[in-house]
Image (cartoon, coloured by chain):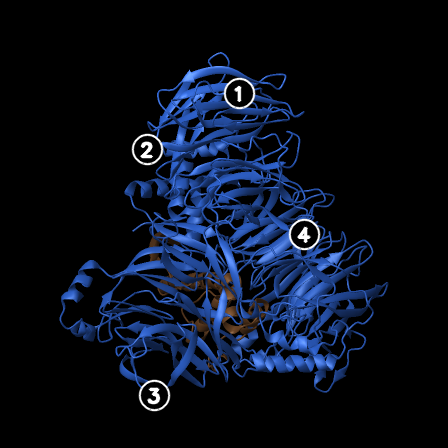
Amino acid sequence: MYLYNLTLQQATGIVSAINGNFSGGKVQEIVVARGKILSLLRPDDLGKLQTLHSVEIFGCIRSLAQFRLTGAQKDYIVVGSDSGRIVILEYNKEKNVFDKVHQETFGKSGCRRIVPGQYLAIDPKGRAVMIGACEKQKLVYLISHTIVYSICGVDCGFDNPIFASIELDYSEADQDSTGQAANEAQKHLTFYELDLGLNHVSRKWSEQVDNGANMLVTVPGGGDGPSGVLVCAENFVIYKNQGHPDVRAVIPRRADLPAERGVLIVSAASHKQKSMFFFLLQTEYGDIFKVTLEHGNEGVTELKIKYFDTIPVTASMCVLKTGFLFAASEFGNHALYQFQAIGDDPDVESLSSTLMETEEGFQPVFFQPRGLKNLEETPQIFSLCGRGPRSSLRILRPSLAISEMAVSQLPGVPSAVWTVKKNVSDAFDAYIVVSFSNATLVLSIGETVEEVSDSGFLDTTPSLAVSLIGDDSLMQVHPNGIRHIREDGRINEWRTPGKRKIVKVGSNGLQVVIALSGGELIYFEVDMTGQLMEVEKHEMSGDVACLDIAPVPEGRQRSRFLAVGSYDNTIRILSLDPDDCMQILSVQSVSSPPESLLFLEVKASVGGEDGADHPANLFLNAGLQNGVLFRTVVDMVTGQLSDSRSRFLGLRAPKLFSVKVRGRPAILCLSSRPWLGYIHQGHFLLTPLSYETLEFAASFSSDQCAEGVVAVAGDILRVFTIERLGETFNETAIPLRYTPRRFVMQPKRKLLVIIESDQGSYTAEEREAARKECFEAAGMGENGNGNVNEMENGGDDEDKEDPLSDEQYGYPKAESNKWVSCIRILDPRTATTTCLLELQDSEAAFSVCTVNFHDKEYGALLAVGTAKGLQFWPKNSLVAGFIHIYRFLEDGRSLQLLHKTQVEGVPLALCQFQGRLLAGIGSVLRLYDLGKKRLLRKCENKLFPNTIVSIHTYRDRIYVGDIQEYRRDENQLYTFADDVVPRWLTASYHIDFDTMAGADKFGNVYFVRLPQDVSDEIEEDPTGGKIKWEQGRLNGAPNKVEEIVQFHIGDVVTCLQKASLIPGGGECVLYGTVMGSLGALLPFTSRDDVDFFSHLEMHMRQEHPPLCGRDHMAYRSAYFPVKDVIDGDLCEQFPTLPLDLQRKIADELDRTPGEIMKKLEEIRNKII
Amino acid sequence: MKFILNIFFLLIRGRVVWVLYIYFSPYRTFTRNSSLISGLKSFEKKMQASDRFNINSQLEHLQAKYVGTGHADLNRFEWAVNIQRDSYASYIGHYPMLAYFAVAENESIGRERYNFMQKMLLPCGLPPEREDD
């Protein structure tokens, strides 16, 4: 089996973010690393972030830094990755790519403890970079056995660059068995100086520092400040510099924080202006503090910490010069905040001068979090299924989101709709014209949309086409003729000869072609005076099915091409040039009669907003009656057709309409679903819209919506806009209360049962009580109006008005053995919760399944595995485990507890097996039957080496995954076959009778299969493999499974699922990851495709090595050699290559670049 | 499984000695070069005192340069400590893994990173008592 790996939705979680002027000039931009993706974002004036460029680097980005050469206008990016190389990138504005400026190899690849890449520090003047590892560093001669916590550059003006690092030497602790050395182990702050003259690094200064130190922040130096560093430690911020006494201040604590917990700074941002500078430090609970330094000639006199605001915990923060704060959240949506104030009020919580030393240590300072005062939220940009209070369930549909602007009922069932401007130069449309079977309705667009009768359109007949013709006159084509309405109100009518009727019309701004019944074509042109003149007649062999004229190229008087589709399954291209008018230029035969034709012109662009260069192109699109969209390239000179592609869209013949998307022409195809074809980042994408079936559509532009669509379906007129272009999925988010763990589908009603649990939190009642207390204490606080009743609802997720929403502030922390958990039933269609059970007494739900027991007394029951008082650290311990059995009531909308059975471990996996319940409890696999008061043990197997995390069953086989190993069981729970490799399984999925797919926590996906002979043997063996099992082999089961597929995703896969995303598409395995990406593995169906793509992948590896210097093959084989998986993400970078390189690769493959792109598109279309 | 077959040749007292060594890339990232070192150690027996001194100093240099490199006299505790430190470094290096742990323990990623760093000091508890040298 060969698989094709394709990422459907890129990861959205952010590892690290930096800001600067990467494209040069004054624009502030942000570069974010999303694990293996590097993206450049730019906030626009409205406070929305736009992704300018995004590239997969096939490596793991660990750190980012930006620097600017002295006197330059542009920032460069330094990337620390797992490639063992340091890479300096520059953003190339013209081509919209990252260019590699420099690449230097210094060590082995992979995330290793002694190979630098984990930390990056930049000299503030851009002269040197220090790159560090978890142990020992680059640029510094060897320091033995030291753990490095953080490094940063020290701003010392234009003296020799100095770097600071927090280090911990453990060499003595390793030798001393009494533990004394370990207790005395002391963190040091060490300064390293790079002597620019000698090109040599020396250890300049080292001093003891607080043992909780974890982060360093550069303090501006030279002319701007006192130089030195801020050391962030647990509970403290300390200013340190060489030859300067420490200035220490305590970090304020939340009043409700348990005493055992410290406060740790997790991210920092600094802002520097001409006259002042400040730092924003965020704690692990999300509170941001503003830190300022009072300094004079004698150095820093005071360190001030002031509570600034609370936002969700971030991985990185960036203060933009334009007054925005970009917060890259650890989990959940990232956000851009606008500064309202910079917290200049004098009420500072913590000062270094007021620090009190008491007998127990330093006196803590407390504060209460409050609503946002200094920051203002702007629209959200990205999303990731979160955790804790920011959790949500997201329903993804592979389609584009639309937003409906207006829906209105019409008096009859319309057959068509058009919009028309009054003048070419108008920005907005003037009329919506709706045609019925015997009348035409004209609506004028203004403040409101209303019917008008003075437009000059004939309203007693149906219309075939309405458009603007010439500069300022309107044309209405009806079955009996053409009505030409001049700007001054004069009306010219052209009537069809005899009793023939017009059946089809094609027009652009200057040319009109009509087809009469019987197959006669008549061609009109607008002359100099704005008059519509008949130019030519042409008799076709049969009736015309559809026709279209290409848009007039810029600077020309007319377009040269007319496309005519006939019922004899052909499309002809006719010339409209005066010298060879109505000559057939080319013929294309298609599989079924064409229903609709549309020319789409793509203008030449170089490095536009969306990326690569595009030569000008003209595409002819045809919707065929069998539901296929057929697309070919029209040669702009000769009219020859080439490079045809087709795609099945739906059961109805697609009708094609031209619309505008971001100022560019796009096509809207209405089949049984609406689809949009548009160009995004150099690719032509055809994506379904999440909307109902439409009959007819036209582009719509008015004051309120610049790029909308007006469409008719049934007797309803709809106006909508298309949003979030470039995304594959349209998502609907439903907020949840705690971190979701698992869900199952209730089979009959299609309701979802979700279990949620969180460690170290208070229950809803406790939270509410604490909240009340807090508000009472605060009384009429600065932000509250004292309305306690309103606050009481605060615990509810639904209450959006709550000024202290949990989404923003997080749940208060409790002791680590406290858990909160709930079971929720949710109706995904209406996105409503029908039942919510909160578990009591620190019980947390970990597994869930529905089960039908033999006796069928209750029908389907819900089994939930829970644990009470579970603790991971210092030792894995728990009070008790339980399996709850619930009964569905009210059509599955609510639950009733039947009974609870105590078990000795955590039931992490539950599954139904032949009318009984299989449970993985710790390392025991046990079969239960339903009793009156509790579950009854029937059978068990205690031979698993580790905790069981997944169970699947199929017929009489059981597939068990344990936390380290994967095994498979048979019949009376005899281990029958297992895998030879130990795995830390995070997700598994049963593919077929003999095959399992699995994913481990290192980011690998693999498939294992039972050899055919073994599989046959076991089916015939009457003992079910019992005898063989007693023998065993290699400390395990007697049979071993074979690994058939192996691939490194580079991200922890949390779920696997088999699905087919489009009608007629292939079935593929979908995976979701911790960082929020979704991908698919599609099995190849033909050997030819395998050959082609493996060769393409090979050439891509050679010609287009990954940006950050990691070898692609090595990356995909990071833990195991990649086996039988072709990386579609790499192949899909083919269109971004320079044209000559594309041609070179194509030559090697004996194809043209166009054919390769067609292949790539085809395989993508099979998935989505 | 990935095997890398390497052929080294060493010049020992003028004779060319070929060493075939199979480099076994284990599942975890923390690759051990102990097979190389044990291979070298076996050579030691056949060598003169001066060579031995030379090889030893080379080994020491290797071990000092590459923290975590094993040697023939490595005891169980030292081995485990290296494995644990390598694991923690790998967790810190792979952000998705940190996120995975953070979700499980309901902590922030920054706190998880700090905890792992702190655990690198004594990952396996106190070292065992030394029986005399």
Total marks drawn? 4
Of the residues under marks 1 and 4, which one precedes in the sequence?
4
Of the residues under marks 2 and 3, which one precedes in the sequence?
2
Q: Which residue is under mark 1?
A: A494
Q: Is residue A1113 left or right of residue A145?
A: left
Marks 1/4 same chain? yes
Residue A713, given in percent of the width and then of the height, sits at: 48, 45
Q: Hey, what amino acid is under mark 2?
A: Ser
Q: Nearer the viewer, residue A257 or A293?
A: A257
Question: For the residue labelled by badge 2, is the local secondary structure a helix, a strand or a loop?
Answer: loop
Residue beneath the point at 53% across and 81% down = A818
Identify the image quadrant of residue A527. top right
Q: Which colour denotes chain A?
A: blue
Host chain of mark 3: A
Q: Hey, what amino acid is under mark 4?
A: Gly
- Which residue, as the protein is rendered here, is positioned at the far top? A579
